[in-house]
Image (cartoon, rainbow, N blue to C red):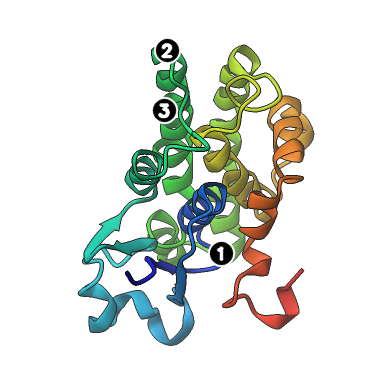
Amino acid sequence: MSKPILYSYFKSSCSWRVRIALNIKGVDFEYKAVNLIHDGGMQRKDEYTSVNPMQQVPAFVVEGTTLTQSIPIMEYLEEKYPSPEILPKESLQRAKVREICEVIASGIQPMQSSSQVLQRVEKLSSAEEKAEWAKFWINKGFIALETLLEKSSGKYCVGDTVTMADICLVPQVGNAKRFKVDMSQFPVISKINDELEKLEAFEKASPFKQPDCPKDLRA
């Protein structure tokens, strides 16, 4: 059986989530880079739109089927490879994990995504104004997320076990740092992120360790 294929871009936070999940699950996969910037964006070429008509990454090809959107891909991986689990067994905790995932994936990340909102903002604003737009929405989302995590967190987002919520958190903190959000405002988020970055699955998934990361940015 052939390896599953992950279509990814090193800076994409959605791709980053899936890389972390694949590493946690120990899944051997083929990495195919999709450069979202070079030459007008490879995601808009016919050869990729046939893979993902939304012209976004990630796309995950497994058993002849293509899955898109990071959250359903992670749900699939949890069902296919149940150990180690990234969703708690207890119903309320599972709901809490999904809540945090949605706050990040639906409430924060799209407002600063270069492939979505910022592309339009770029046509209307300077680079500085675009960055301020992203910083504003990340900061607003993190205020809410900090409050949620004050109630749910232990060592990680929900208790002391790594879950999908943590997988979503680290890439979003990466985006926050990229847009120069003052993380001292968010001690709970920062503490959890620091713990997660020590884990091999997260370290290996870092954008700066991917094959399509430019040499001058590699860690």
Residue 53, image quadrant: bottom left
Q: Is residue 172 above or below residue 38?
A: above
Q: Which mark is residue 87?
A: none
Q: Which mark is residue 98?
A: 3
Q: Quadrant of the C terminus?
A: bottom right
Label 2 secondary element? helix
Would residue 173 be found to the left or right of residue 101 on screen?
right
Instruction: State the residue at coordinates (46%, 61%).
Output: 114
Q: Quadrant of the N terminus?
A: bottom left
Q: Which mark is residue 92?
A: 2
Label 1 secondary element? loop
Would residue 63 be found to the left or right of residue 181 on screen?
left
Mark before the other along the chain sequence, 2 or 1: 1
Binning the other alpha carbons within 10 Å of mark 2 as few (below 14), some (14 to 19) or many (20 upward) gives: few
The residues bearing labels 2 and 3 have C-alpha atoms spaced at a distance of 10 Å
Instruction: State the residue at coordinates (34%, 39%).
Output: 79
Amino acid at the residue labelled 2: Leu
The residues bearing labels 2 and 1 have C-alpha atoms spaced at a distance of 33 Å
